[in-house]
Image (tube, rainbow, N blue to C red):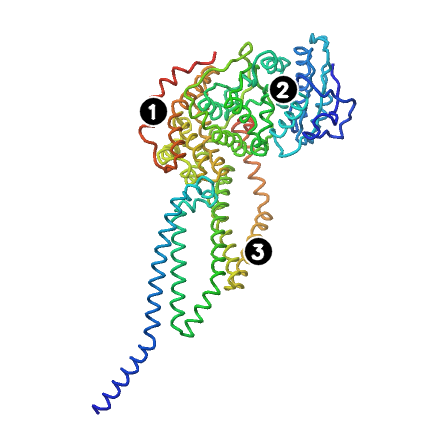
Amino acid sequence: MSCWRQPTNSVGRRAWRPDRRTPMRESIPPETDIVIGIPSYNNARTIGHVVRAAAAGLQKYFPQFRSVIVNSDGGSTDGTREAALNASVEDAGLLFLPTPLFPVHRLSMPYHGIPGKGSAFRMIFQLARDMRARACALLDADLRSVTPEWIDMLLRPILFGHYDFVAPYYRRHKYDGTITNSIIYPLTRALYGSRVRQPIGGDFGVSLPLIKRYLARDDWETDVARYGIDIWMTTIALAEKFAVCQSFLGAKIHDAKDPSADLSAMLQQVVGSVFTLMREYERVWLQVRGSQDVDIFGFRFEVGLEPVPVNVPRMLGHFHQACQDLKDVWSLALLPDTLAEVLRLDRAAGESAAFHLPDELWAKIIYEFAVAHRERAVERGQLLRSLTPLYMARVASFVRETESVNSADVEEKIERLCISFEEMKPYLVELWTRNLEGGARHAQPSSAGIQSAGAGAPAARMEVKTHD
Amino acid sequence: MIKALEFILRSTLDRLSAQAVQYLPSILASLIILLGAWLCAVCARWVVQRAFHGAGIDRFLRRSGLNAVAGGAFSLGATRLAAAACYWVILLAGILIALSTLNSTLLSRVTERVVMLLPKLVTAALIVLGGLWLGQYLSRSMLIWACNQRLKSAHNLAGLVRIAVIFLSAVVAADHLDFARGVFLSAFIICLGGLVLAISLSIGLGRHEILNWFYRREDQAEQAGGREWSLWNHL
């Protein structure tokens, strides 16, 4: 049971503007308990399923709550908004859905500002705050594996627990989410000491206090407005000590979204957001050593996953070319020894079967880029875009090493990478703090820093627990 | 004969001594001014170096990103650059003042010309410096973009961008100085026209090859890895 409505003028008029093209049947209540936000851009094929799953989830698990589903659209031209508005839960009886006390309201409206997922989230948050929603769940519009249970898993820890932020915990194909696996998860875990496995998963649950905190910030017009939004939300929740948990959602299967997007721009936005927040929260992460598990709700099970094809020779070709072309740019970001190691790898790139980029070297590369980003050794956009070929090399190495292993072994491999990041953290701290004190950038860290990295290893290992 | 020779020598010496008496004070004044200017320049250089070090200008430029914006040009040392500029400006001013004390019409005219030209020279130098910076910045952006697009001639493209920007700034600077204006402007127009013509011809004549190359590449990608690896899968 649901009804289609447009927001009245009394609800957050300054925050968002309803689209006059959509018919307004009745006004929505000024207050609600739950907001489900679905940012979209040309997702006509899949958004109907997401809206149906969300509506069914609300009816099934939260029939006693007032709820609104909000589609925040980026100007789709393929009828996404119409698809969202026309989707309805059929055969409620067959789904054993109870009769809700309140109807599930639904809105679809375009957001304003910088085009991107972050701007869409901003509008949803403003709406949730103005409607005094107790909890807000965010779902990607391209999901094909979303079920009504996702709504329960994302909202229940907030509504019935003491949590402010629910991160997703999916089963994904070993080559899906490579930015997460190669950079964002190990780096976030080493920095803030919390093992949030999918920090940029895209589907989250957020409490009202955290929504207010997000909206109080003034960096919405940066990369946060685009792909940087996911890691921005997770990092703020972790760094500002909000209660964070994870919910197991099963498989994440989604459409190839925005295939025209440029990978280096995507990498720039995501990694740039992490590096920018590193500067803001340096007092937090400089104190952190090792990492702790984060609660995972839900019954975990194995699922079949769609294979993700990869083209390793193409990636290695990219890396090889960059070693010729971008050597000078990298020399401004990387320390001489690290650069020499990277260039040595170039010789191995010819024999793709034997290509291997060690975890420790990868951690050093990321840490040195973070320091270069802070120091503006190169213009930041150029610096982050020049990371793309190195990232390609890392992914190629990962693919080569995990070609014939199962998902459990892949998780083990990612765990080892995370431990390397944690063990190398004293190296980052030394580079970072020396830079704070105005030290010479291109001097190699003292042996004390390296020794402390080694000395810190057992402690870091002691704290590491594998995900069950 | 001897008397005549003695007379010539004496008159020559008299004339020389008279000229020396006439010019010596001016020359001495010039030398003193030069010496003073040099001392001032050295002192100013020292003061600027101390002030820049004390204020942490190099660190500020590095942290504020101006160093990166300038393509690393300041990494040579903003302090050293500013101190050297200060030194040479004071020394040049001293030389001009010293020359003006000689009361020579020619030297006065030269001094006047230099003084009149100085603002234009400074402006032209700033234009060229701006062009050098912009050329470096744009060429690096082009290099990274071309490399990420896997274009084979990334370095050549970057070099082309840099040369074009620097050449453009040189044309503007020459125009500002009224120096060989016609030559620079004509060269610029000829180059630009030639470039446009070359691009038009290459597109017109090679469109079939370009399309074939594009389709071939697509086919290779399809064969190599099935459907192209989705960017979205990276996240």
Does residue A31 appear left or right of residue A354 in this picture? Answer: right
The amino acid at mark 2 is Cys
Chain letter belonging to callout 1: A
In this view, the mark in front (3 or 1): 1
Of marks 2 and 1, which one's residue comes earlier in the chain?
2
Residue B19: percent from left, percent from top: 32, 79
Real-space CA distance between mark 2 and mark 1, rounded to the nearest whole angstrom: 43 Å
- In front: A340, or B192? A340
Which corner quadrant of the image does residue A390 belong to? Answer: top left
Q: Mark on residue A136?
A: 2
For residue A224, above or below residue A99: below
**Most foreground residue, B140 or B7:** B7
Distance between mark 2 and mark 3 Cα atoms: 59 Å
Callout 3 crowding tier (Cα within 10 Å): few <14, some 14–19, many ≥20: few
Point out which mark residue A263 bears. none
Does mark 1 fall on the same chain as mark 3?
A: no
> Which residue is denoted by mark 3 in the rendering?
B193
Q: Are marks 2 and 1 on the same chain?
A: yes
Q: Are marks 2 and 3 in contact (CB under 8 Å)?
A: no
Q: Amino acid at mark 3?
A: Gly
> Considering the numbered disc 1 on the image, is that residue within a helix, a strand or a loop?
helix
Q: Dot 2 falls on which chain?
A: A
Q: Position of residue A330 (x, y in %)?
A: 42, 37
The amino acid type of the residue labelled 1 equals: Ser
Front label number (2 vs 3): 2
Mark 1 sits on what residue? A452
* Residue B208 in which image quadrant: top right
Q: CA distance from mark 3 to mark 1?
A: 62 Å
Mark 1 Cα within 10 Å, few/some/many (few <14, many 20+)? some
- Give x and y (percent) for residue A312: 47, 28
Callout 3 touching callout 1 (CB < 8 Å): no
